[in-house]
Image (cartoon, rainbow, N blue to C red):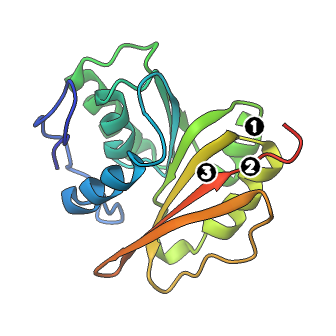
C-alpha cells in the first residue's frame, strides 16, 4: 500500500496489521480520490478518517496538503501502526489527531468539530454506515457541502438518510462499494 500523490507520493505504508483489518487497496483509493477531486479541493481541509486502520485515507489527504486529519480507530494495536505510519511520513502533531476507541462512543463526544471530508471504512461485517450517517448529521460533524465517502461491502445498502444528504455517485469494485454523499446542513 502506497501513497498515490502529493508530498509523500510513492511511500509505502506500514501494513503489518491484524487479520481483522482490511486496508483499502491502492486501486480502490485511486478510484476514490479521482472521484473526490471532482467535488472538493483537499488543500487546507479538515478531514476525518473513521475506522482508520493503517490511516491510508487520511495520510493520502495529508500528502495532498489537507490541513489536519482526525483518525478514529478502535484497536489499540492498530492505533500503534497508525502512529508509526505518521512518524514514518514525518507528520507533525499539528497535522493529525488520533482518537482511540469504539466510534459509537468516541464520535458523539467529538461532535461539534466540523470536517470538510469524512471517510469511513468500517469492518464489512458491522453494517454500520446508516447509523454513522445519522450520527454525523445529528452532530453536524460535516461542514455545509462537506463530502462523506463510505467504503463498504456490496451487501450493505445505504438507505433512510435524511434530506441533509445528497447522493453524489457510487462505484463498485469487486465486493467493495464506494458511496459519495454531500452534506447540506439544514440549520448551519
Q: Is residue 17 above or below residue 107?
A: below
Q: Is residue 99 above or below residue 123?
A: above
Q: CA distance from mark 1 to mark 2?
A: 17 Å
Of 93 and 37, which appears nearest the observer?
37
Of 26 and 181, which appears nearest the observer?
181
Residue beneath the point at 17% across and 50% down: 1
State the image quarter where residue 55 is shown: top left
State the image quarter where residue 43 is shown: top left
Q: Is residue 87 above or below residue 138?
A: above
Tell me if 109 is positioned left or right of 132 in this view. right
Residue on which disc 1 sits: 111
Q: Dividing the image into 4 quarters, which one contains the C terminus?
A: top right
Residue 87 % position (x, y): 26, 22
Judge the density around disc 3: few (<14), some (14-19), many (≥20) Cα neighbours within 10 Å. few
Residue beneath the point at 89% across and 42% down: 187
Residue 38 % position (x, y): 41, 49
Dot 3: element: loop
Residue on which disc 3 sits: 102
Judge the density around disc 1: few (<14), some (14-19), many (≥20) Cα neighbours within 10 Å. some
Residue beneath the point at 19% across and 36% down: 5
State the image quarter where residue 66 is shown: top left
> In the rendered structure, are the residues bearing label 2 and label 3 in contact, judged by CB atoms less than 8 Å apart?
no
| N-term-proximal mark, 3 vs 1 | 3
Of 151 and 110, which appears nearest the observer?
151
Judge the density around disc 2: few (<14), some (14-19), many (≥20) Cα neighbours within 10 Å. many
Mark number displayed over residue 84: none
Residue on which disc 2 sits: 184
Closer to viewer: mark 2 or mark 3: 2
| N-term-proximal mark, 2 vs 3 | 3
Tell me if 43 is positioned left or right of 81 in this view. right
Q: Is residue 80 above or below residue 175?
A: above
Q: CA distance from mark 2 to mark 3?
A: 27 Å
Amino acid at each position: 500500500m502506497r501513497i498515490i500523490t502529493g508530498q509523500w507520493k510513492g511511500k509505502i505504508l506500514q501494513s503489518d496489521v491484524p487479520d481483522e483489518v482490511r486496508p483499502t487497496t491502492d486501486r480502490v483509493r485511486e478510484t476514490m480520490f479521482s472521484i473526490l477531486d471532482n467535488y472538493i479541493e483537499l488543500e487546507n481541509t479538515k478531514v476525518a478518517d473513521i475506522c482508520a486502520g493503517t490511516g491510508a485515507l487520511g495520510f493520502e489527504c495529508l500528502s495532498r496538503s489537507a490541513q489536519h486529519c482526525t483518525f478514529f480507530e478502535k484497536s489499540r494495536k492498530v492505533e500503534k501502526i497508525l502512529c508509526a505510519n505518521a512518524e514514518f511520513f514525518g507528520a507533525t502533531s499539528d497535522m493529525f489527531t488520533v482518537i482511540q476507541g469504539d466510534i459509537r462512543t468516541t464520535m458523539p463526544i467529538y461532535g461539534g468539530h466540523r470536517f470538510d471530508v469524512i471517510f469511513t471504512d468500517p469492518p464489512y461485517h458491522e453494517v454500520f454506515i446508516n447509523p454513522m450517517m445519522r450520527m454525523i448529521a445529528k452532530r453536524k460533524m460535516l461542514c455545509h457541502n462537506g463530502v462523506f465517502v463510505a467504503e463498504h461491502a456490496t451487501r450493505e445498502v445505504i438507505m433512510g438518510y435524511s434530506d441533509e444528504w445528497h447522493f453524489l455517485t457510487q462505484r463498485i469494485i469487486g465486493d467493495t462499494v464506494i458511496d459519495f454523499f454531500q452534506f447540506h446542513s439544514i440549520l448551519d
